[in-house]
Amino acid sequence: MNHQIIFDVELLRRYDKSGPRYTSYPTAVQFNAGFTEADYRAQAQRSNTTPPRPLSLYFHLPFCDTVCFYCACNKVVTKDRKRASPYLERLHREIALQAELFDRARTVEQLHWGGGTPTFISHEEMRQLMAVTREHFRLRDDDQGEYGIEVDPREIRPETLAVLRELGFNRLSMGVQDFEPAVQKAVNRIQSEAETFAVLKEARALGFRSINMDLIYGLPHQTVASFARTLEKIIGAGPDRLSVFNYAHLPEMFKPQRRIAADDLPSPQEKLNILQLTIERLTQAGYVYIGMDHFARPDDELAQAQRNGTLYRNFQGYSTHAECDLVGLGITAIGMVGDCYSQNRKTLEDYYAAIDAGQLPVLRGIVLGADDKLRRAIITQLICHFALDYDAIERIHGIRFAEYFAQELADLGVMQQDGLIAMDESSIRVQPAGKLLIRNICMVFDRYLREKQEQRFSKVI
Ligand SMILES: C[S@@+](CC[C@H](N)C(=O)[O-])C[C@H]1O[C@@H](n2cnc3c(N)ncnc32)[C@H](O)[C@@H]1O
Ligand code: SF4
């Protein structure tokens, strides 16, 4: 695969519009309350029979000790560590309820603790959570599963990493964002380089693999020069992967963001310059651009999966485990089981009420139809591999690509003229200038967006 990316400011500006990140298709906007616990149960049961796939478990641990003002994650901010206990009690019960639905022979190939801040809970609570999981699901004991956790270096106590390793975690992702004091102060996240790199060093020594660091560009007081300093420090430490997220300032949607002054944010032009710098520096330093905010060293399994054509995308971003049914546990968690997506209730109160009544805390979801599955396959292929061969899709989904997608192919004509993609009668290849605009290319195949646009258009007329 050609790893080149071209940063074309004029194209980026022209195609600049908000769009889904396609961690699912249909996206969460389409999940609806007509999908109930009974639907989820039926899908889970069916998934045991239609050649059963391995499992991936996602646990949402929402608590954070302090709030970072930019944060758009689903979290509960509290200094009271005791608040974790009633939550974990319910989580244990949800594990038991969920496990009843899945054949015990199905191994857990992938497991992830996300947040919030999973390391908010005590070592004892971590041990208990893993023990309850192991009691109900078939976890791997050979360190060959992909068992990962998100850690906040400010929340690592002596022994925390050793405990996590002992519990079976072998992947780790840590929040960094930016090392500049002025930026850290403006976002209420003071985190030293020393504590961050100490975690990286210890994690490596303990045998964690594919260690990731999260950075954010577009934060208050950031400039090209300031972000360059952060990048050089990160490159010097050399994590296996980097996620470089784009900060979108949406204070109406995310309350903590109201404490960020809009005047302190870099201009759109400065943000583009920071992005350009990031891509140039990381690729010069040997990182491969995987797509959608993610970079990895060429020997990392994410880059290998992209080369082998086995890369996949789900709620945790890119993944090497395409073949799993994903069970989401805890508030707001999203699952992907059989032919459905489902999301759990979003507040502690609602979640506790469902579990206390002995119910699965399903809030909403969607059962995918044949058209959804077809479009999901196309979007996944494009976003993971920047290429799409029609014959594989035609064989699996029983369609004639040129007929079924006549309108989409016509719409892609403009992108071809602009040099984002190359098309012939059997394939689409995303070009180096189109890689940063992969969402826009995927959006052409999104039926729900298309219907919304058509509705809007007919209203205007
Ligand atoms: C759940 S946190 C990671 C674990 C831990 N809570 C921490 O902060 O270290 C997930 C990541 O999402 C990113 N993030 C959160 N809010 C964001 C936003 N508004 N825009 C871009 N990235 C954001 C940050 O990079 C953060 O590290
Ligand atoms: S970035 Fe992490 S630590 Fe900060 S508020 Fe969000 S989830 Fe909590």
Image (cartoon, grey):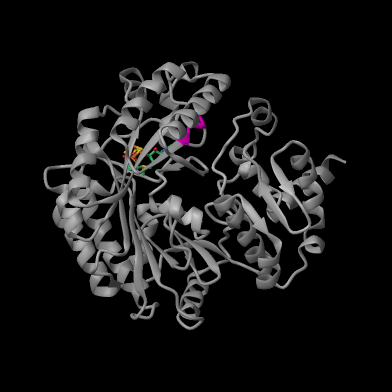
Q: Using the rendered view, name the quadrant where residue 77 is placed.
A: top left
> Is residue 311 in view from this perspective?
no
**Residue positioned most to the bottom:** 49
- View extreme (left): residue: 158
- The image position of residue 350, as x and y in percent, is 39, 57
Answer whether residue 155 is visible to the viewer in this image.
yes
The stretch drawn in magenta includes residue 363: no
Image location (x, y in percent) of residue 373: 63, 65
Which SS does the magenta portion mostly show?
loop
Considering the image in quadrants, where does the C terminus appear? top right
Q: Is residue 207 above or below residue 129?
A: above
Front residue of 212/355: it is: 212
- Which residues are the magenta region? 245-250
Looking at the image, which is closer to me, 126 or 84? 126
Residue 30 to residue 55: above or below = above
Q: Is residue 248 magenta?
A: yes
Q: In the picture, residue 301 is in which quadrant?
A: bottom left
Q: Position of residue 392 (x, y in %)?
A: 66, 67
Query: Residue at image x 75%, y 42%?
Result: 416
Report the front residue among 349 and 379.
379
Residue 100 relative to residue 152: left or right: right
**Along the horizontal axis of the image, is 150 left or right of 131?**
right
Residue at 14% of width from left, 56% of height from top? 124
Where is residue 365? Give x, y as percent. Answer: 54, 62
How many badges with numbers are in the image?
0
Q: Quadrant of ligand 1?
A: top left
The residue lying at 33 percent from left, 21 percent from top is 180
Q: Residue at x 64, y 36 (%)?
A: 433
Q: Is residue 117 above or below residue 54?
A: above
| Foreground of the two, 57 or 381 | 381
